Image: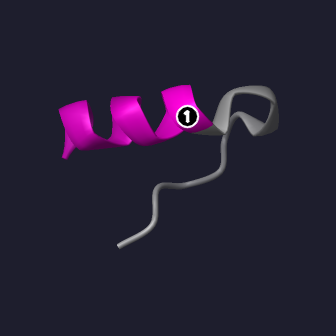
Amino acid sequence: MEPVNFNCESKGNARTVYLELG
């Protein structure tokens, strides 16, 4: 599953946050 793109400026961070939340 791909992380929700809520932060276009930091896709890398978005993925990390998604993994932490998930």
Residue 5 position within the rendered picture, expressed as x and y whole percent measured from the top left:
65, 50
Residue 21 image point, x, y percent:
23, 36
Q: Residues within 10 Å of mark 1 (few under 14, many from 20)?
A: few
Q: Residue furthest bottom?
A: 1
Q: Please say whether residue 15 is one of the residues in the magenta stretch.
A: yes
Asked which secondary structure carries label 1, the reply is helix
- Going by the image, does 6 lie left or right of 8? left
Q: Which residues are magenta?
A: 12-22
Work out whether 9 lies above or below 2.
Answer: above
Determine which quarter of the picture holds residue 12.
Answer: top right
Estimate the x, y position of residue 8 in percent, counting from the top left.
Answer: 79, 39
Q: Residue at x 19, y 47 (%)?
A: 22
Q: Is residue 19 magenta?
A: yes
- From the viewer's side, name the closer residue of 5 and 11: 11
Q: Residue at x 64, y 39 (%)?
A: 11
Q: Is residue 4 left or right of residue 7?
A: left
Determine which residue is flagged by label 1: 12
Quarter in which the N terminus is drawn: bottom left
Q: What residue is rendered at 68% in x and 27% in y? A: 10
How many numbered discs?
1
Q: Residue furthest front?
A: 12
- Where is residue 9, by image quadrant? top right
Which SS does the magenta portion mostly show? helix
Type of the residue with mark 1: Gly
Query: Residue 4, relative to residue 13: is it above or below?
Result: below
At x 44%, y 42%, the residue is 15
Color encoding of the figure: one colour
Q: Residue furthest right?
A: 9
